[in-house]
Image (cartoon, coloured by chain):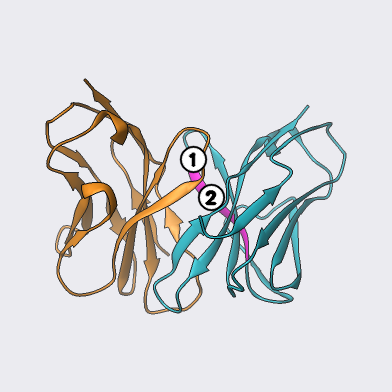
Chain colours: A orange, B cyan
Protein backbone atom coordinates (compact mmCIF):
# COMPACT_ATOMS: atom_id res chain seq x y z
CA UNK A 1 0.00 0.00 0.00
CA UNK A 2 1.11 3.56 -0.58
CA UNK A 3 0.01 6.83 0.97
CA UNK A 4 0.77 10.53 1.02
CA UNK A 5 0.29 13.05 3.81
CA UNK A 6 0.18 16.78 3.34
CA UNK A 7 -0.01 17.94 6.96
CA UNK A 8 -1.05 21.52 6.21
CA UNK A 9 -4.38 22.34 4.62
CA UNK A 10 -3.31 25.96 4.20
CA UNK A 11 0.01 27.78 3.90
CA UNK A 12 0.18 31.58 3.92
CA UNK A 13 3.29 33.53 2.98
CA UNK A 14 4.12 37.08 2.03
CA UNK A 15 5.28 37.84 -1.49
CA UNK A 16 9.05 37.68 -1.74
CA UNK A 17 9.42 35.31 1.21
CA UNK A 18 10.49 31.69 0.82
CA UNK A 19 7.74 29.08 0.83
CA UNK A 20 7.60 25.42 1.81
CA UNK A 21 4.73 23.00 1.22
CA UNK A 22 5.23 19.77 3.11
CA UNK A 23 4.72 16.19 1.93
CA UNK A 24 5.54 12.86 3.53
CA UNK A 25 4.96 9.50 1.92
CA UNK A 26 4.79 5.80 2.55
CA UNK A 27 5.49 3.19 -0.10
CA UNK A 28 6.81 -0.35 0.07
CA UNK A 29 8.99 -0.16 -3.01
CA UNK A 30 11.06 2.48 -4.72
CA UNK A 31 9.34 5.88 -4.40
CA UNK A 32 8.47 7.91 -7.46
CA UNK A 33 7.34 11.32 -6.19
CA UNK A 34 5.49 14.13 -7.91
CA UNK A 35 4.16 17.62 -7.29
CA UNK A 36 1.20 19.03 -9.17
CA UNK A 37 -0.44 22.44 -9.02
CA UNK A 38 -4.08 23.32 -9.62
CA UNK A 39 -5.22 26.84 -10.38
CA UNK A 40 -8.89 27.74 -9.84
CA UNK A 41 -11.28 25.95 -12.19
CA UNK A 42 -8.44 24.19 -13.96
CA UNK A 43 -7.04 20.68 -14.10
CA UNK A 44 -3.83 19.68 -12.37
CA UNK A 45 -0.52 20.66 -13.94
CA UNK A 46 2.72 18.75 -13.46
CA UNK A 47 5.41 20.71 -11.59
CA UNK A 48 8.27 18.32 -10.92
CA UNK A 49 9.18 14.74 -10.08
CA UNK A 50 11.79 12.65 -8.32
CA UNK A 51 12.59 9.25 -9.80
CA UNK A 52 16.26 8.75 -9.07
CA UNK A 53 19.51 10.70 -8.84
CA UNK A 54 20.04 14.08 -7.20
CA UNK A 55 17.86 14.57 -4.14
CA UNK A 56 17.18 18.20 -5.10
CA UNK A 57 14.83 18.38 -8.03
CA UNK A 58 14.09 21.55 -9.96
CA UNK A 59 10.84 22.09 -11.78
CA UNK A 60 8.60 24.62 -13.44
CA UNK A 61 8.04 28.23 -12.31
CA UNK A 62 11.13 28.26 -10.05
CA UNK A 63 9.91 25.50 -7.75
CA UNK A 64 12.15 22.80 -6.36
CA UNK A 65 11.71 19.85 -4.05
CA UNK A 66 14.06 17.87 -1.87
CA UNK A 67 13.80 14.12 -1.55
CA UNK A 68 14.74 12.90 1.93
CA UNK A 69 14.69 9.14 2.15
CA UNK A 70 15.35 8.87 5.88
CA UNK A 71 12.48 11.22 6.69
CA UNK A 72 10.30 9.92 3.83
CA UNK A 73 9.64 13.49 2.81
CA UNK A 74 9.43 15.42 -0.44
CA UNK A 75 8.81 19.05 0.49
CA UNK A 76 8.13 21.64 -2.20
CA UNK A 77 10.06 24.89 -1.95
CA UNK A 78 10.55 28.22 -3.67
CA UNK A 79 13.07 30.86 -2.60
CA UNK A 80 10.83 33.86 -3.33
CA UNK A 81 7.06 33.51 -3.54
CA UNK A 82 4.89 35.34 -6.06
CA UNK A 83 1.22 36.25 -5.70
CA UNK A 84 0.65 34.19 -8.87
CA UNK A 85 1.90 31.08 -7.02
CA UNK A 86 -1.36 31.07 -5.04
CA UNK A 87 -3.01 27.75 -5.90
CA UNK A 88 -3.77 24.25 -4.64
CA UNK A 89 -0.76 21.94 -4.54
CA UNK A 90 -0.82 18.15 -4.58
CA UNK A 91 1.91 15.68 -3.76
CA UNK A 92 1.70 12.17 -5.26
CA UNK A 93 3.59 8.90 -4.89
CA UNK A 94 3.87 5.74 -6.92
CA UNK A 95 5.68 2.49 -6.20
CA UNK A 96 8.40 2.44 -8.84
CA UNK A 97 8.96 -1.30 -8.39
CA UNK A 98 5.61 -2.09 -9.96
CA UNK A 99 4.16 -1.09 -13.26
CA UNK A 100 0.63 -0.95 -11.98
CA UNK A 101 0.41 2.69 -13.05
CA UNK A 102 -1.44 3.88 -9.97
CA UNK A 103 -0.38 7.01 -8.14
CA UNK A 104 -1.76 8.08 -4.78
CA UNK A 105 -2.39 11.78 -4.22
CA UNK A 106 -2.40 13.77 -1.01
CA UNK A 107 -5.39 15.85 0.02
CA UNK A 108 -3.78 19.04 -1.20
CA UNK A 109 -2.42 22.22 0.37
CA UNK A 110 -3.80 25.64 -0.47
CA UNK A 111 -1.01 28.16 -0.84
CA UNK A 112 -1.89 31.82 -0.48
CA UNK A 113 0.74 34.43 -1.25
CA UNK A 114 -0.17 37.91 -0.07
CA UNK A 115 1.26 41.08 -1.59
CA UNK B 1 -1.99 20.83 -22.49
CA UNK B 2 -1.62 17.19 -23.44
CA UNK B 3 -4.39 17.03 -26.01
CA UNK B 4 -7.00 15.85 -23.51
CA UNK B 5 -10.61 16.93 -23.73
CA UNK B 6 -13.50 16.02 -21.50
CA UNK B 7 -17.18 16.19 -22.28
CA UNK B 8 -19.46 17.48 -21.04
CA UNK B 9 -17.71 20.13 -18.97
CA UNK B 10 -20.74 20.67 -16.77
CA UNK B 11 -23.74 18.47 -16.12
CA UNK B 12 -26.69 18.55 -13.78
CA UNK B 13 -28.71 15.38 -13.48
CA UNK B 14 -31.18 13.73 -11.18
CA UNK B 15 -30.71 10.84 -8.81
CA UNK B 16 -31.18 7.48 -10.48
CA UNK B 17 -30.35 8.56 -14.01
CA UNK B 18 -27.41 7.12 -15.96
CA UNK B 19 -24.56 9.45 -16.82
CA UNK B 20 -21.60 8.96 -19.14
CA UNK B 21 -18.54 11.16 -19.14
CA UNK B 22 -16.11 11.08 -22.01
CA UNK B 23 -12.36 11.58 -22.06
CA UNK B 24 -10.63 11.95 -25.40
CA UNK B 25 -6.89 12.10 -26.07
CA UNK B 26 -5.06 12.86 -29.27
CA UNK B 27 -1.60 11.50 -28.44
CA UNK B 28 -2.14 7.72 -28.41
CA UNK B 29 -1.10 7.13 -24.80
CA UNK B 30 -1.62 3.70 -23.36
CA UNK B 31 -2.59 4.63 -19.79
CA UNK B 32 -5.69 6.69 -18.99
CA UNK B 33 -7.24 7.47 -15.61
CA UNK B 34 -10.45 8.75 -14.08
CA UNK B 35 -10.31 10.63 -10.76
CA UNK B 36 -12.81 12.47 -8.67
CA UNK B 37 -11.92 15.54 -6.65
CA UNK B 38 -13.80 16.42 -3.49
CA UNK B 39 -12.99 18.96 -0.77
CA UNK B 40 -10.95 17.36 1.98
CA UNK B 41 -10.29 14.22 -0.05
CA UNK B 42 -7.90 15.42 -2.68
CA UNK B 43 -7.86 13.35 -5.82
CA UNK B 44 -9.10 9.77 -5.67
CA UNK B 45 -8.67 7.19 -8.41
CA UNK B 46 -11.90 5.66 -9.72
CA UNK B 47 -10.71 3.43 -12.56
CA UNK B 48 -7.82 3.33 -14.94
CA UNK B 49 -6.99 1.71 -18.24
CA UNK B 50 -3.72 0.29 -19.51
CA UNK B 51 -4.87 -0.44 -23.03
CA UNK B 52 -7.88 -1.04 -25.23
CA UNK B 53 -10.36 -3.18 -23.29
CA UNK B 54 -7.91 -3.37 -20.34
CA UNK B 55 -9.15 -1.63 -17.23
CA UNK B 56 -8.75 -1.93 -13.48
CA UNK B 57 -10.37 -0.53 -10.38
CA UNK B 58 -9.11 2.30 -8.27
CA UNK B 59 -9.85 3.10 -4.66
CA UNK B 60 -13.41 4.45 -5.17
CA UNK B 61 -14.81 2.34 -7.99
CA UNK B 62 -18.17 1.37 -6.48
CA UNK B 63 -21.04 2.79 -8.54
CA UNK B 64 -18.84 3.45 -11.57
CA UNK B 65 -17.96 1.50 -14.68
CA UNK B 66 -15.59 2.29 -17.54
CA UNK B 67 -15.02 1.27 -21.10
CA UNK B 68 -12.21 1.73 -23.55
CA UNK B 69 -13.02 0.43 -27.01
CA UNK B 70 -10.35 2.49 -28.74
CA UNK B 71 -7.10 4.08 -27.61
CA UNK B 72 -8.26 7.65 -27.74
CA UNK B 73 -11.48 7.38 -25.73
CA UNK B 74 -12.06 6.41 -22.10
CA UNK B 75 -15.66 6.52 -20.90
CA UNK B 76 -16.82 6.73 -17.29
CA UNK B 77 -20.41 5.66 -16.59
CA UNK B 78 -22.50 6.19 -13.50
CA UNK B 79 -25.17 3.54 -13.96
CA UNK B 80 -27.57 5.17 -11.51
CA UNK B 81 -26.31 8.50 -10.25
CA UNK B 82 -26.50 9.33 -6.55
CA UNK B 83 -26.00 12.62 -4.73
CA UNK B 84 -22.74 11.29 -3.28
CA UNK B 85 -21.36 11.24 -6.82
CA UNK B 86 -21.63 15.00 -7.09
CA UNK B 87 -18.03 15.93 -7.73
CA UNK B 88 -15.49 17.22 -10.20
CA UNK B 89 -14.20 14.45 -12.42
CA UNK B 90 -10.76 14.57 -14.01
CA UNK B 91 -9.36 12.41 -16.73
CA UNK B 92 -5.61 11.98 -17.05
CA UNK B 93 -3.13 10.30 -19.34
CA UNK B 94 0.26 8.94 -18.45
CA UNK B 95 3.08 10.21 -20.57
CA UNK B 96 6.29 8.20 -20.53
CA UNK B 97 6.92 4.50 -20.09
CA UNK B 98 7.99 4.31 -16.47
CA UNK B 99 7.84 7.63 -14.75
CA UNK B 100 4.07 7.91 -14.57
CA UNK B 101 3.93 11.67 -15.07
CA UNK B 102 0.24 12.35 -15.53
CA UNK B 103 -1.38 15.09 -17.55
CA UNK B 104 -4.90 16.09 -16.75
CA UNK B 105 -7.93 17.21 -18.67
CA UNK B 106 -9.93 20.32 -17.75
CA UNK B 107 -12.47 18.43 -15.63
CA UNK B 108 -16.21 17.82 -15.62
CA UNK B 109 -18.34 19.29 -12.88
CA UNK B 110 -21.22 16.90 -12.17
CA UNK B 111 -24.12 17.76 -9.92
CA UNK B 112 -26.60 15.06 -8.95
CA UNK B 113 -29.81 16.46 -7.50
Residue neighbourhood size for the residue with mark 1, other residues' Cα within 10 Å, grouped as few (<14), some (14–19), many (≥20): few
User: Quadrant of the image for the C terminus of chain B?
Assistant: top right
Image height check: is A90 above or below A100? above
Residue A45 on image: x %, y %? 43, 50
Residue tagged 2: B44
What type of secondary structure mainly makes up the magenta span? Answer: strand
Residue at 28 percent of width and 53 percent of height: A60
- Residue drawn at x 74%, y 43% as measured from the top left: B8
Left or right: residue B50 compared with residue B100: right
Q: Residues within 10 Å of mark 2 (few under 14, many from 20)?
A: many
Same chain under badges 1 and 2? The reply is yes
Identify whether B71 is placed above or below B66. below
Q: Which residue is found at the position 45% from the left and 74% from the top? A: B96
Judged left or right of residue A58, residue B113 is right
Which numbered marker is on residue B41? 1
Splitting the image into 4 quarters, where does residue A9 fall?
Answer: top left
* Residues under numbered marks 1 and 2 in contact, where contact means CB atoms less than 8 Å apart: yes
Number of marks in the rendered image: 2
Residue A88, quarter of the rendered image: top left
Q: Report the Cα–Cα distance between label 1 and label 2.
A: 7 Å
- Residue B53 image position (x, y, % from top left): 74, 76
Q: Of all residues shown, which one is farthest toward the right?
A: B17
Identify the secondary structure beneath mark 2.
strand
Q: Point out the stretch of residues depicted in magenta.
A: B42-48
Amino acid sequence: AQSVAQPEDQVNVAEGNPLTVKCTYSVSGNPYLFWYVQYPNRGLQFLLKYITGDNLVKGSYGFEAEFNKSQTSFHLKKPSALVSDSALYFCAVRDGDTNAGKSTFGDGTTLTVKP
Amino acid sequence: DAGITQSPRHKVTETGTPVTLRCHQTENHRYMYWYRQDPGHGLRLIHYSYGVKDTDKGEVSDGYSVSRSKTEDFLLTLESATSSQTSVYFCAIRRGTNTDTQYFGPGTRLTVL
